[in-house]
Image (cartoon, rainbow, N blue to C red):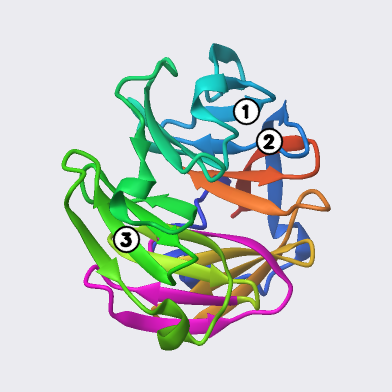
Amino acid sequence: MKVVISLILMGFFTISFAQKSDSTRWLKVCELEIGQDEKWALDGLENCIITSKNVIQKYDSAGVLQFFQSSKSFGRLTSIQSINPMKWITFSEEQQLICLLDNTLTLSEQCIDLSGFGIGNATHIAVSSQSDKLWVLDQLNSRLLLLSLGRTNQFQEISNLKGILNISMIASIQEWNNQLFLFDAAGTIYQFDVYGSLLSANKFENIMDFAVKENNLVLVQNNQLLLYNLAVPEKKLIDLPIKNVFEVKISGNFFYFRTENKIYKYTLLFNQ
């Protein structure tokens, strides 16, 4: 019997990969076009947002275009992320602006100028699990801010990142279940709790990108997925269905892999 199993479930590492090579296979669901320098994001309902020059496009779980809007007023987008299926947030490093969009990609509130928080140069954002809160990395001042979108004068701060972590450049940040993950250019992923205390630091080689689900890191490494269980810890490797993947995202039971000009949606089948 063939059963679709999400590798991101808590019990994933009970599955043995010391099996025949045909014990698993990837099943492609759909694929979408994306430009080389464009941005993309997913929500919890497997809707996919893709930027295309000065337009933001929203595709449903089957890859059918649902909405599109001009993005000229938001500035050149550095990132777009889902707060929930009804709300999206855009970030422009060039203009130091964050803007909120509704589920039809319409601007729902006035954009927020990050300079109002005394931020020297915001380079990355990460939506928080806490309601209407957003992590912002102020790379210039080596600090992380947890901003309240509803009350723009309130925030929490993790200061002196360079001194605490002994790093100079953070490549990306993301939060999962009230834990914040920082990925530096040298390949180390740092894990913080909700209070800003460092929980772990794990060094990996040749990592292109990573996602987090439950207690697992899902990393793109040398045309493979490296799955690292933070609780054990334990590592597993599985071959990717396509080559030259440099970004990975997860929504539900589905994996999304980005190459130079395509986004591929896959699920993994286990033969039992």
Q: Mark 3 points at which residue?
A: 145
**Secondary structure found at label 1:** strand
Q: Does the magenta stretch include residue 210?
A: yes
Q: What range is drawn magenta here?
A: 188-215
- Determine whether 98 is above or below 64 in the image: below
Q: 85 left or right of 169?
A: left
The structure residue drawn at horizontal position 28% and vertical position 74%, both measured from the top left corner, is: 196
Label 1 and label 3: CA atoms lie apart by 26 Å
Q: Which of marks 1 and 2 is nearer the N terminus?
A: 2
In the image shown, does 246 or 236 lie closer to the viewer? 246
Badge 3 local density, few (<14 within 10 Å), some, or many (20+)? many
* Residue topped by disc 2: 38
The image shows residue 12, relative to residue 88, as above or below, that is below
Please identify the residue farthest to the right as the structure is shown: 243
Q: Position of residue 236 (x, y in %)?
A: 61, 73
Which of the image's four quarters has the C terminus?
bottom right
- Contact between labelled residues 2 and 1, with CB atoms less than 8 Å apart: yes
Residue under label 1: 51
Residue 30 lies in quadrant:
top right
Tell me the amino acid under the disc marked 1: Thr
- Would you say residue 59 is visible in this rendering? no
Disc on the earlier residue, 3 or 2: 2
Helix, strand or loop at mark 3: strand
The picture places residue 109, in percent across and down from the top left corner, at 29, 23
Looking at the magenta stretch, what is its main secondary structure?
strand
